[in-house]
């Protein structure tokens, strides 16, 4: 493949085996600079990053995120924070009152832009030869993360990413057939059932090829994750942080 950027994106994998080798200050600065330039709705720049390099704090995050050891092992963990505290200060300087944080749309905007920032962080890190693994598990104990990072009201730790030099590279997982993902003009689910059944077999063959005996078909693994719902207290913690979901209002992109 001739295009390096496309190759980088199309070979994405989540690495969970890291060396102790530090990430250089120069590389980390480049990654953060790239992430800050990611787009946000209305140029609101309502995203902040908390860069965690301290080993004890990374170990605590690993514990809060349902005991994921690679968080403690990787030399850098970056928390992507939805930050309407920052925007409220700006709006007050303009003599106005912020209301967006009190709407479901506001929280959705924050989540979307956190995801865009996460993707930029991962791409930048991989472009410098580092491995990454995104961690949504920090929301397993959002309040614990808020306390650990000393986050102010109107902020929320949406997602994180471990990054570092890779020890044992992960295998890239196959994906569902493209016609279950791409829909031209309108949504078409005619091939979904057949595509899922075929993918279950493809994924099982992948697990066997890498020697993973506990691997499940995609349908069974997804059922295990989605059937039980979620015990995370995302809404309750967000409300305690000053967010709300009961007001409405138009918001232009």
Image (tube, rainbow, N blue to C red):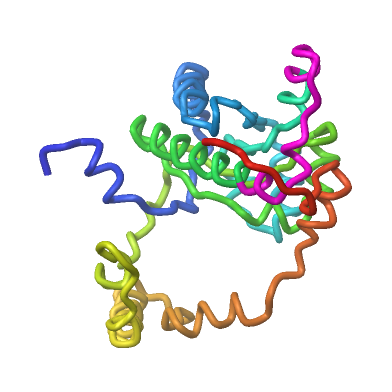
Residue at 29%, 66% in the rendered image: 183
Left or right: residue 154 compared with residue 168: right
Is 36 situated above or below 227?
above
Confirm whether the magenta stretch covers residue 92. yes
Drawn side of residue 149 relative to residue 14, left or right: right
Measured as percent of width and height from the top left, residue 205 is found at 29, 80
Q: Residue furthest right?
A: 240
Q: Quadrant of the N terminus?
A: top left
Please report the bounds of the magenta region as a residue range: 90-108
Q: Position of residue 100 (x, y in %)?
A: 72, 38
Q: Is residue 91 magenta?
A: yes
Residue at the spot x=42%, y=47% of the render? 167
- Residue closer to the observer: 88 or 51: 88
The prevailing secondary structure element of the residues shown in magenta is helix
Of 14 and 194, nearer the camera is 194
Residue shown at the point (34%, 60%) measured from the top left: 171
* Rendered view: 58 above or below 141: above
Q: Give the percent coordinates (x, y) of residue 207.
A: 36, 76
């Amino acid at each position: 493949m001739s295009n390096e950027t496309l190759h980088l994106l199309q070979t994405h994998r989540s690495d969970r085996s890291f060396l102790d080798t530090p990430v250089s200050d120069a590389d980390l600065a480049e990654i953060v600079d790239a992430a800050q330039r990611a787009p946000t709705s209305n140029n609101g720049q309502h995203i902040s990053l908390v860069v965690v390099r301290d080993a004890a704090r990374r170990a605590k995050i690993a514990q809060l995120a349902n005991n994921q050891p690679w968080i403690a092992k990787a030399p850098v963990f970056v928390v992507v924070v939805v930050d309407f505290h920052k925007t409220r200060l700006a709006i007050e300087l303009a003599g106005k009152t912020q209301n967006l944080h009190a709407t479901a749309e506001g929280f959705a905007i924050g989540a979307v832009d956190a995801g865009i920032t996460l993707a930029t962080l991962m791409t930048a890190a991989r472009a410098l030869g580092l491995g990454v693994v995104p961690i949504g598990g920090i929301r397993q104990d959002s309040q614990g993360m808020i306390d650990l990072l000393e986050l102010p009201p109107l902020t929320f730790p949406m997602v994180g990413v471990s990054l570092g030099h890779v020890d044992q590279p992960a295998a890239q997982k196959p994906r569902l057939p493209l016609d279950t993902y791409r829909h031209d003009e309108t949504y078409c689910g005619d091939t979904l059932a057949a595509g899922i059944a075929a993918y279950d077999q493809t994924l099982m063959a992948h697990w066997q090829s890498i020697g993973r005996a506990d691997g499940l078909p995609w349908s069974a693994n997804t059922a295990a994750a989605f059937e039980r719902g979620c015990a995370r207290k995302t809404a309750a913690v967000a409300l305690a942080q000053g967010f709300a979901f009961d007001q409405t209002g138009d918001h232009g992109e």
